[in-house]
Image (spheres, rainbow, N blue to C red):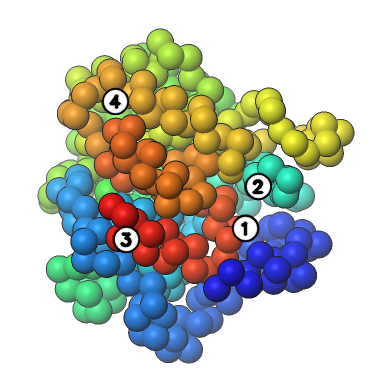
């Protein structure tokens, strides 16, 4: 299993990162469609001791895959074959959009990091909704009550003005909430112009209130609602978001999205500058994401489910975040460097030393 880093260097390190991602994801889905899923699950299935109750749901493992890997719901079942306790699909927008011009994904291998300015490229909520529905039905047949959890992450369509953002989010909510185990409002990507302005409490309050009410109405059940925030918020803004989440009876907060910062990188500064604008994810985000998590826990106590993401690479990273107050933990960037058995290795380590 540890052969993957060698395979990565030989097969993917020289390739355009977005193309490498497309090929790698296609291989994961091909293995599932060829019937290898049942065999993989024997190796990758999380131990029963890792089951975690949160958001009114049962997660087979507290460790899940963050939004961004499967943007359109094409490989939900295949990703669960790899041992993730949850897969968060998205970010999905109300209307289909191509995202930003390529190249828009860059590796910083020395830092085990990635810079992206993808720009929410996706097929749009109307196209993704049937895939979510089909995946839920199939997983229910396969796993029954122990079915892995599907999260859905929604964002603003780029062409929509900020003044019309609530209506745009509600368009996605109406189409996607019935098929989501939980719903995430993404207001923290740096790659959609003006989006982070929605993180201010004054604009966030009506958005979250409207999405929560609409989600429960169209799904005819309570759909757990979370908001995903940036690591670049000030401590005072983090406290304000925590208070707002409690005021609106949100179910949780995901901390954090990518950062626009570039401090402390090992990669040559000229190479980093050549990548241009975009959100930085991976190992360099570890410390700040942990600080935000601790700040949220201090502000909210145990009244919110906190989902930690950012710089998570190992089982020890997962444990550290659980100890710091997270109920669930997500990863993404390390998946690109560690390969398909990454989640399974983390789960085995967590089971050996909870």
What residue would you read off at disc 2?
112
N-term mark: 1 or 4: 4
Mark 1 to mark 4: distance in Å? 30 Å
Q: Which disc number belongs to residue 337? A: 1
Residue at image point 72% right, 49% down: 109
Q: Which mark is residue 352?
A: 3
The mark that comes first in sequence, 2 or 1, is 2
Q: CA distance from mark 3 to mark 1?
A: 24 Å
Sequence-wise, the earlier of marks 2 and 4 is 2
Mark linked to residue 247:
none
Q: Which residue is rendered at x = 75% and y = 36% of the image? A: 266
Q: CA distance from mark 2 to mark 4?
A: 27 Å
SS state under label 3: helix
The reply to whether the C-beta atoms of the residues labelled 2 and 1 are less than 8 Å apart is yes
Residue on which the image places disc 4: 297
- Residue 46, picture quadrant: bottom left
The front one of 76 and 82 is: 82
Q: Earlier in the sequence, mark 4 or mark 3?
A: 4
User: Residue 138 location, x and y as percent?
Assistant: 28, 76
Q: Secondary structure at mark 4?
A: helix
């Amino acid at each position: 299993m540890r052969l993957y880093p060698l395979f990565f260097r030989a097969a993917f390190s020289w390739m355009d990162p977005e193309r490498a991602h497309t090929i790698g994801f296609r291989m994961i889905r091909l293995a599932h469609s060829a019937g290898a899923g049942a065999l993989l699950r024997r190796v990758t299935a999380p131990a029963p001791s890792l089951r975690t109750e949160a958001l009114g749901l049962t997660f087979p493992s507290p460790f899940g895959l963050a939004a961004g890997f499967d943007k359109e719901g094409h490989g939900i079942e295949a990703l669960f074959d790899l041992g993730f306790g949850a897969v968060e699909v998205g970010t999905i927008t109300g209307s289909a959009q191509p995202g930003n011009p390529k190249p828009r994904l860059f590796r910083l291998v020395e830092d085990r990091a990635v810079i992206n300015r993808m720009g929410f490229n996706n097929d749009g909520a109307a196209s993704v909704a049937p895939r979510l529905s089909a995946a839920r039905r199939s997983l229910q047949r396969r796993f029954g009550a122990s079915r892995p959890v599907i999260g859905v992450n929604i964002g603003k369509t780029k062409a929509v003005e900020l003044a019309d953002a609530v209506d745009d989010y509600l368009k996605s909510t109406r189409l996607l909430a019935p098929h989501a185990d939980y719903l995430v409002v993404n207001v923290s990507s740096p790659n959609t112009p003006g989006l982070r302005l929605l993180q201010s409490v004054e604009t966030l309050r009506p958005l979250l209130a409207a999405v929560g009410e609409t989600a429960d109405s169209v799904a005819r059940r309570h759909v757990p609602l979370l908001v995903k925030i940036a690591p670049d918020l000030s401590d005072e803004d983090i406290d304000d978001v925590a208070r707002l989440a409690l005021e609106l009876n949100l179910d949780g907060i995901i901390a954090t999205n990518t950062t626009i910062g570039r401090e402390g990188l090992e990669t040559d500064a000229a190479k980093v500058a050549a990548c241009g604008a975009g959100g930085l994810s991976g190992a360099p985000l570890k410390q700040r994401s942990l600080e935000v998590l601790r700040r949220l826990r201090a502000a909210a106590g145990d009244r919110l489910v906190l989902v930690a993401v950012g710089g998570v690479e190992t089982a020890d990273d997962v444990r550290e975040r659980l100890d710091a107050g997270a109920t669930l933990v997500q990863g993404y960037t390390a998946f690109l460097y560690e390969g398909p058995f990454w989640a399974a290795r983390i789960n085995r380590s967590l089971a050996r030393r909870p």
